Image: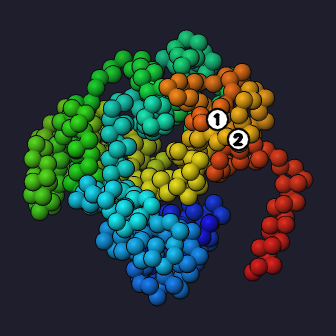
Amino acid sequence: MRIIIIGAGKVGYTLAENLSKEGNNVIIIDKNPETLGRADENLDVMTIKGSGASTKVLMEADIKHTDLLIAVTSYDEVNMVCCLTAKKLGAAFTIARIRDPEYAEELTMLKEEIDIDMVINPEQAAAEEIARVLNFPTAINVENFAKGRVRMVELKIKSDMSIIGMTLDEVSHKISSSLLVGAIIRDKEVIIPNGDFLIQENDDLYIIGKTSNVLNFCKGLDDKYHKTRNVMIVGGGRIAYYLTNLLYEMDMKVKIIEINREKCKTLSEVLPDTLIIHGDGTDEELLLSENLGDMDGFISMTGIDEENLMSALLAKQNGVKKVFTKTSRSNYINIVKSLGIDGVIIPKLITANQILKYVRGKAIESLYKLEEGQAEIIEFIVGAKSKFINIPLKKLNLPVDTIITTIIRRNEIIIPHGDDVIKKGDSVIVIIKNNSVSNLDEILNSVSGGIQSELQSSIKKLGNIINM
């Protein structure tokens, strides 16, 4: 696919990195020579200096033969103009990053009037992710599948949890057979486990099942389980605004600490029922005076990663049960988690997952990457011509490290066994390691390998050399 990305900032760079790795032909447009130089030096992409809203620049990028244009500059209005211009000049599809809360209420109309195919809002998506996790106090990450009927929960196994030392088969028989442990992260490696796998302290388990069953399982693991009621947020940016509105709908009380006085005034106007405190979120004395120790949840998300980490560590030290921090650096994830922080929010990665799902096609309903892309959890819609239909799962020649975790059929949620079959129209959730696919049948195609696969790979490499 030929893709133009306008804006080479954090989001644009991450998108270009992921999309080029998947074999797409990526062109980046930006006015800033420094950000363009970084992309040109580190990524397999083409770069063009200029404005993405300029007809001349877009024509230079061959917009007429472009499959997708993604506008992710810092300005919503520029992104909208880029998409409008691109569509007029012949781009097949467009995606715009639109973050302003005022526009968020008018997205349906904007999409129709400007003919934008997809709108992404990283801050709103990050807020939704945090809200989901706060609703599952034991979890460190929660993802929705099948429009919320199926949940994937990431759990950190702690020393007081009863399932330590159990095999997955024992967990299924003794605790719950209505759930599936689809993946485990141990020592930064993603493992697709079998029934004999032994659970150890500090493992990260990815558990998939019906939402109510997952919630009951989480409650059963934690003797001190209680619903999140009071949340403190440090940093009054867009994520804080979106998150506060979501948490109020979930009957949680929110307190926001923001160092910028003008932001405090604005937040007081748009969130009249929220306590807004003007102050430094890294000041332990201030945090303690605002009853930090009584909080059920704490989220630090200023624009400075180091300050976020300091605030999060103070919260953890003072006994807050669920602590999250925002960072712009994906290589910080494991370092931050090793310090005892429960979760890390990286808006650019959330955005990348959303767009990767769109790029791979309509057969994919949801997509989530594990441990820096080592594995993916993908929800597929099964078409009428799929090779999977009506074949017992035990007879499918699935690749190593691939597992079908859930089948959703109308109102039925199935944790499948060997005799179950997939039918037309089903939603199927699959975990696949070290492979990127666009539809369910590609999983079977990836098994072939051998001499034929090596020959095709050699021919492709020869073609690339000839075209250089």
Please give the residue where the numbered disc 1 appears in the rendered image: 424
Q: Are marks 2 and 1 in contact (CB under 8 Å)?
A: yes
Disc 2 designates what residue? 386
Element at label 1: loop
The quadrant of the rendering that contains the N terminus is: bottom right
Q: Nearer the viewer, residue 362 or 295?
A: 362
Q: Identity of the amino acid at label 1?
A: Lys
Quarter-of-image position of residue 140: top left
Q: Residue at x 37, y 30 (%)?
A: 136
Looking at the image, is 22 positioned above or below residue 131? below
Farthest residue, direction bottom: 56
> Which of pointers 2 and 1 lies earlier in the amino acid sequence?
2
Q: Is residue 153 visible?
A: no
The secondary structure type at the circle numbered 2 is loop
Residue at position x 65%, y 47% in the image: 439
Side (left or right) of 380 relative to 227: right
As shown in the figure, which amino acid type bears the numbered disc 2?
A: Ser
Asked if residue 339 is positioned above or below residue 57 in the image, the reply reads above
Question: Measured along the vertical axis of the image, is residue 6 above or below residue 426?
Answer: below
Taking the image as shown, residue 305 lies to the left or right of residue 190, namely: left
**Disc 2 versus disc 1: distance between alpha carbons?**
8 Å
User: In terms of depth relative to the viewer, which is nearer, 87 or 120?
Assistant: 87
The residue depicted at 44 percent of the width and 27 percent of the height is 211
Q: Quadrant of the C terminus?
A: bottom right
The numbered dot on residue 444 is: none
Q: Residues within 10 Å of mark 1 (few under 14, many from 20)?
A: some
Picture coordinates of residue 99, whole percent (x, y): 31, 60
What residue sits 44% from the left and 64% below the top? 95
Left or right relative to 58: residue 134: left
Badge 2 local density, few (<14 within 10 Å), some, or many (20+)? some
